[in-house]
Amino acid sequence: MSGRGQIAARILTHLVTEASCCRRDLAGALGISKASVSRTVGPLLASGLVSEGTATEREQGGPGRRTVPLSPRPDCVYLLGTDLEGRALRACALDGRRAVVAGEVCQIGTDWPVARVLVEWQELVARVIERAAIPVGRLAAVGGGLPGVVARQGFRTRAFLPPGQWAELDAETPLCAHGVPAMAAN
C-alpha cells in the first residue's frame, strides 16, 4: 500500500472508531501534517467514502479558517460486535457512523454442549451480517465479548454455561469465520 493509501486507511479508521472531526484534529490525532491530511481527504471526498459537514466557527474564536467536520459515509464500512453471556449469544452490526443496523439475541439451550453453542454463535453472526445487508468486503472487524479470563493470544476462555457447568471454550470459529480482523476480550 502506498504512503497516501496508508494515510487514507488511518484517516478512515480514526473517523469510524473515534468520531467525526476536522482536518486539523485529524492531523493532531494521527501525528501527520495538515497538508498530508488535506491531500488525502480530497480523494476520499471525491470517492464518497467521506463527507463534509457544515463549516463551524473556530472553537477559540479569532482569525483563521472555519472548521469543517469530516464524517465517514455510513455504508463505507461495517463493524460487528458479538457477546457470549451466561445464557445468551448476542450480535449486532454497526455502520461507519456506529449506528446499529441489525442485531439479534439467541438463547442458549440448557442442554447444549459447547460444540452446539459455537455452531449457533457462528450462525447468529452470519444471520446478523445478512440482515444488515453488509456488502462483500465492507465488514472491517469483529469483536467478541467472552466471559472469564481470555487468553492473551487467541480466543480461548473458561466459561460458565448452562446448565451450570464450567466449560473450556475456543471462540475462534465464530469470530474469525469472515476473514477480517477479530478480537476477543472480557
Image (spheres, rainbow, N blue to C red):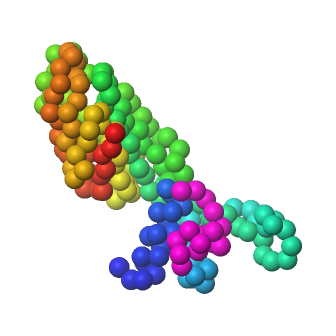
Instruction: Answer above or below: position of 78 versus 15.
Output: above
Q: Nearer the viewer, residue 145 or 68?
A: 145
Tell me the quarter of the picture where residue 140 sits.
bottom left
Q: Position of residue 72 (x, y in %)?
A: 55, 60
**Residue 161, quarter of picture:** top left
Image position of 140 (left or right of 26): left
Q: Is residue 93 left or right of residue 127?
A: right
Residue at x 54% of width, y 79% of height: 32
Q: Does the magenta portion include 161?
A: no
Residue, x 26% and y 22% (percent of image)? Answer: 108
Residue 19 in magenta stretch = yes
The N terminus is located in which quarter? bottom left
Is any atom of residue 6 visible in this view?
yes
Q: Is residue 40 above or below residue 49?
A: below
Q: Find residue 129 and report its image quarter.
A: top left
Q: How many marks?
A: 0
Left or right of 98, for residue 108: left
The C terminus sits in image quarter: top left
| Residue visible at 49% across and 40% down in the picture | 100
Q: Is residue 130 visible?
A: no
Q: Residue at x 21, y 38 (%)?
A: 157
Q: Position of residue 178 (x, y in %)?
A: 26, 51
> Taking 84 as reference, is 69 above or below it?
below
Residue 65 in picture, x, y percent from top left = 78, 76
Question: Is residue 186 positioned above or below 32 on the image?
Answer: above
44 or 115, nearer to the observer? 115
Residue 9, percent from left and from top: 44, 70
Q: Which stretch appears magenta?
A: 18-32
